[in-house]
Amino acid sequence: MTTDASSKLSTRTIVIGVIALAAALLFMLPAASGPLRLITKPIPVLCMALWLALQPGRGASQWAVIIGLVLGAAGDLLLEMGDSTFILGLVSFLLGHLAYIYAFMQDCRRPSRAGAVLAYIYGVIAFFVLYQAGNLGAMTIPVAAYVLVITTMLWRGLSRLGAPGVVRLSGLWVRWKPLSFTISDSVLAYSMFVTRFDLASLIIMSTYWLGQLGITLAAATQRTPEPSTATAG
């Protein structure tokens, strides 16, 4: 019975993984058309949400991550639809990040002052570079709000590694999420508001998908219900 269930789960994981990888590769094809990109872009993250939803022992943290993944997939679709839905896409991603912050807070509430300093210094520098070199215009306040949320997510992600009550593997996976997503969003913002450059799309999407995968695996490996409030760090 146990072997059959394990085999079934393994097969399900492989199928979902193959679908996600195929969609990602199709999206990244240089010859991919607009409709193909629109269809395939949200599929990898939706597959991650589906896989996590099928895992046993789901709690508030896991459901928050699932919601964040679905919001991320919606943001993918809205951004791909063009400038007219850019703000909606930004809002969708912002809400997704808030869901991730909520998930991080379920098992770790330690302040991690060093992590906070590093994260917010990065946020200030990133926004200053965009503001000085870019052409934010009416996007200044929305971009500032987005930077604030993503740097907060970076801080809370960094605070989890080594925290009491946080499974070590989960802490390692979830640290990769905010770091890679920060890279992805920084490159995206630079290419949009400052200047475009070769390989920008590859860097943006690869780090973005790896980040989403990181938080998916972190949520799947974390099962500790009691939040850590230790103040170390």
Image (spheres, rainbow, N blue to C red):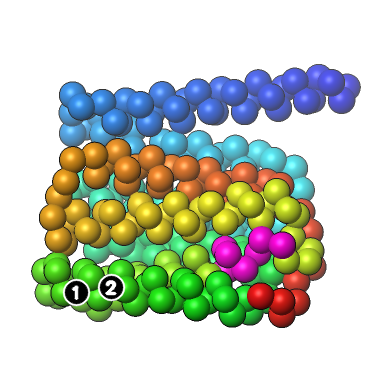
Q: Quadrant of the N terminus?
A: top right
Q: Is residue 156 above or below residue 38?
A: below
Q: Of helix, strand and loop, which mostly describes the magenta segment?
A: helix
Q: Quadrant of residue 102?
A: bottom right
Residue in view at x 44 percent, y 36 percent: 44
Picture disc at residue 127: 2
Residue situated in front as seen by the camera: 142 or 232: 232
Under mark 1, the amino acid is Tyr
Q: CA distance from mark 2 to mark 1?
A: 6 Å
Cβ atoms under marks 2 and 1 closer than 8 Å: yes
* Residue 29 in sight from this viewpoint: yes
Residue situated in front as seen by the camera: 74 or 195: 195
Q: Quadrant of the C terminus?
A: bottom right
Residue in view at x 21 percent, y 69 percent: 130
Residue in view at x 71 percent, y 80 percent: 231
Q: Is residue 6 above or below residue 129?
A: above
Q: Quadrant of residue 224?
A: bottom right
Outermost residue, right direction?
Answer: 1
**What is the secondary structure assignment of the residue under circle 2?**
helix
Picture disc at residue 40: none
| Residue on which disc 1 sits | 131
Residue situated in front as seen by the camera: 68 or 137: 137
Tell me the crowding category of disc 1: few under 14, some 14 to 19, or many 20 or more residues within 10 angstroms, Cα based: some
Residue 147: % across, % down: 35, 70
Residue 160: % across, % down: 65, 64
**What is the secondary structure assignment of the residue under circle 1?**
helix
Instruction: Locate residue 175 relative to residue 76 in the image: left or right.
Output: right
Q: Quadrant of residue 64?
A: bottom right
Q: Which residues are magenta?
A: 156-162
- Answer whether residue 233 is magenta in the image: no
Residue in view at x 76 percent, y 48 percent: 57
